[in-house]
Amino acid sequence: MADVVSTRPLLDKLGVRPGARVALVTTDDQGDGDPFEVLRASLRERTADVTEVRSGDPAPPGTDLIFLAADSIDDLLRIGVLRRALVPNGAIWVVSRKGRAATLRDVDVMEAAKSVDLVDNKVVAFSPTHTSLRLVIPVVLRPR
């Protein structure tokens, strides 16, 4: 059976709705490039509420989607702080290198998520060089 390539736009796969409040979190050292370069242009067509967050800065409270560029375990330590900025049904997408260039394993991301009461529930091919793993607050832990 041949591989089926999805024609669905990346923003739809990532759950970016019109008007969503989005934060792009980058590290001080992006190494071989900015993983958000293509995403940034697409986001501006869907929502005007996009915040660039540098290493060490908090994401704005009430954020729907946070995209965290992560290349190391140290980058994953930010997940706990970023979780506080999420709306209850929001998500943190951890974007990391894939293939031979990968510096993180999916189990590293899952372990970091679990340590701050988040669960992973979706993987999306972010680009030819990066993958993304969605982390959410479990329904039983969301405020009512």
Image: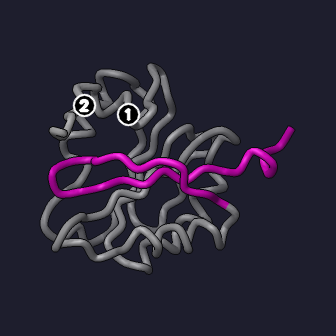
* Label 2 crowd bin: few (<14), some (14–19), many (20+), radius 10 Å: few
Residue 51, picture quadrant: top left
Q: Which residue is mark 1?
A: 13
In magenta stretch: residue 33? no
Q: Is residue 120 above or below residue 142?
A: below
Is any atom of residue 53 visible in this view?
A: no
Instruction: Point out the tag, 1 or 2, that comes first from the N-terminus.
Output: 2
Please name the residue shown 39% across and 25% down the image: 48
Q: Is residue 100 above or below residue 49?
A: below
Q: Which residues are magenta?
A: 118-144
Which is in the foreground here, disc 1 or disc 2? 2
Give coordinates of residue 74: x percent, y percent: 44, 80
Quadrant containing the C terminus is top right
Q: Residue 119 magenta-drawn?
A: yes
Left or right? Give the position of 126 relative to 14: left
Residue 77 is situated, as x and y percent measured from the top left of the image, at: 52, 74
Counting other residues with Cα less than 10 Å from the Cα at mark 1, is it few (<14), some (14-19), or many (20 or more)? some
Q: Which mark is residue 6?
A: 2
When the figure is inspected, residue 39 is found, relative to residue 97, above or below; the finding is above
User: In the image, what residue occupies the spot 36% across and 77% down?
Assistant: 72
Q: In the rendered view, does 68 fall on the left or right side of 34?
A: right
Distance between mark 1 and mark 2 Cα atoms: 10 Å
Q: Kindly identify the amino acid type of the residue bearing the numbered disc 1.
A: Lys
The picture places residue 85, in percent across and down from the top left corner, at 62, 50
Say whether marks 1 and 2 touch (CB < 8 Å): yes
* Residue 140, x across and y down, in percent: 81, 48
Residue type for callout 2 = Ser
